[in-house]
Amino acid sequence: MNNQITTELDQLLNDLFTQTEKKLSSQDLSLIEKHKNELCQRLLPIVQHHLDRCSAEIYLELNDPNDFYWSIILLARLKEPLLFPLMHKLCLLPREFIDNGLGGDFVTEELPKALALTCNGQWKILQSIIENDRLDVYIRSACLDACRTMVALNTIAREEFVAYLKKLLLNGLECTDSTEEWNAFVIITCCDIWPGECIKEIRELFGARLVDTEIISIDNVLDDLQKKQQDCIDDIKEKIDRFFAFHVQKEPSKAQLDDNENFKNFDEFIQEQDQRKKMILSFLSEKKIGRNEPCSCLSGKKYKHCCIHKVNIPDDNVAIETSTITFDPLPSSELSNEELDSLDELYSMIQNNTVHTEQVIKNFLVTHPNIPSVYNYLFVIQTQSKKYREAINTLKITVEKFPTYLFGLIEYGFYFLRQGDPERAHQILKGARTLNQLYPERQTFHASEFKAFYYFMGTYCVAIHDFKQMKTYTSILRKLPGGSKGAMDIVETARRKLLNMDSGEFQSIIASASATDLCPAGMQNNIQS
């Protein structure tokens, strides 16, 4: 290599390593491509040097020269395969070392591209990192991102990687060392390449509460499921294009135009969100009941002659639907007084959950296998202890053994709601919208049964975007002692659903909103004028 080329490369690298805002010009790109071999010979030792410093537990400071960062970026752009083993070594380092040396965004942004562009199809080498739960979850996720990028680039076969993702999802269902956070990252990867092949396993994880829904929701998954597979792949390719373009200098006029457009779009988005929040607040607010309108407690009386002066329903029997709600324990001819006393003791133990509570309940079930509420107690304890896998197994046993037990049916319905399958969830409760419809032979229900049923129905209405009928259920919940929290939870779920909804569907729902027809089918006939 002649002296002129050496000088040009020296100048380029010096600028990149010392200027924090440096971008690559078209001349720089041409020089880099033309002298790939010479450049790689210079850059690989730099990366190795910094990795050695990290391995020796020498923290890197962000005010050090940018030679580490730019060496990786240039080698990745050149698809230099010798970078891959160095990036593999980087993944095994503590996260703080990487952040200190390369910046806090490197792991989530640049690392996946550097791995994907230099891997040469050796993606199975990354599996030991992906499956190592002692490593930082974002580093493991970066390796998954690299694999999905290789799928988009046809570096690895889609079928092979999908089979691996299914293995990870099944591990999430079966193994206690798989966290909700990690399961969420695996699901995100499935969605990135299109989740169709893995949807069964994904639904199971959501149903069992084994996904961090702050990271990804079942609605996000179902939205991606509606896309075409190729569109998902094209989105990944676009991210690679943006990676290549990010470090390239734009023409001044084009750069300014893009900045202006980005600011404009962001401002419009903020304004739209603020406006939508106001509309949602108004839409979800309780309708004020007129003095001469039917009372919302469904007694059949006018509001002025019923609950106008009441804060809560009194602790006695209250007519609702065509049944009676009671706050006293329901009589049971099937249980002895001794068994009833034992149930009271178990219930008290649940309120003060200790490490022994679950085993005590299991021991009781050995001698009393035919009391449905005890299975419910076990389910509650396992859920409180975040033993979600065991809890789902208990729930399925409960529903199979006691197919008419209300609390079992409701929890099983929620299991399918969390899976994003509201139709099946409602089928579990025989499509009923009132307790009278579900149990026509019964005349009296306990307050806890009403709260559980109406909480489920309100949540179900949110899932099917029937916000009008949701309001009826939340209104009734607020009348029940202890029901206000459930009503607030439903309204908050509705608020998030509306806030994240497609603009067209949101406008349609708001436009169709009215103060009439707020009662569920089957309730309207029970309200007297």
Image (spheres, rainbow, N blue to C red):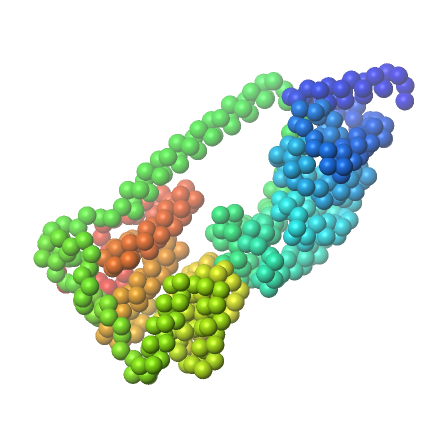
Q: Quadrant of residue 365?
A: bottom left
Numbered marks: total: 0
Asked if residue 315 is positioned above or below residue 255 in the image, the reply reads below
- The quarter in which the N terminus is drawn is top right
The answer to whether residue 162 is seen in the rendering is no
Residue placed at 49% from the left, 48% from the top? 214
Q: Is residue 237 left or right of residue 459?
A: right
- The quarter in which the C terminus is drawn is bottom left
- In the rendering, at what x and y percent does residue 269 appear? 44, 33
- In the rendering, at what x and y percent does residue 495 appear? 37, 46
- In the rendering, at what x and y percent does residue 412 appear? 43, 67
Return the residue nearer the eye: 39 or 430.
Answer: 39
- In the rendering, at what x and y percent does residue 352 appear? 40, 63
Return the residue nearer the eye: 127 or 483.
Answer: 483
Residue placed at 82% from the left, 31% from the top? 45
Residue placed at 47% from the left, 26% from the top? 264
Residue at the far right: name it.
2
The answer to whether residue 341 is seen in the rendering is yes
Asked if residue 14 is positioned above or below residue 152 in the image, the reply reads above
Q: Quadrant of residue 458?
A: bottom left
Q: Is residue 192 left or right of residue 126?
A: left
Asked if residue 398 is positioned above or below residue 522 in the image, the reply reads below
Residue placed at 27% from the left, 74% from the top? 330
Asked if residue 147 is positioned above or below residue 446 in the image, the reply reads above
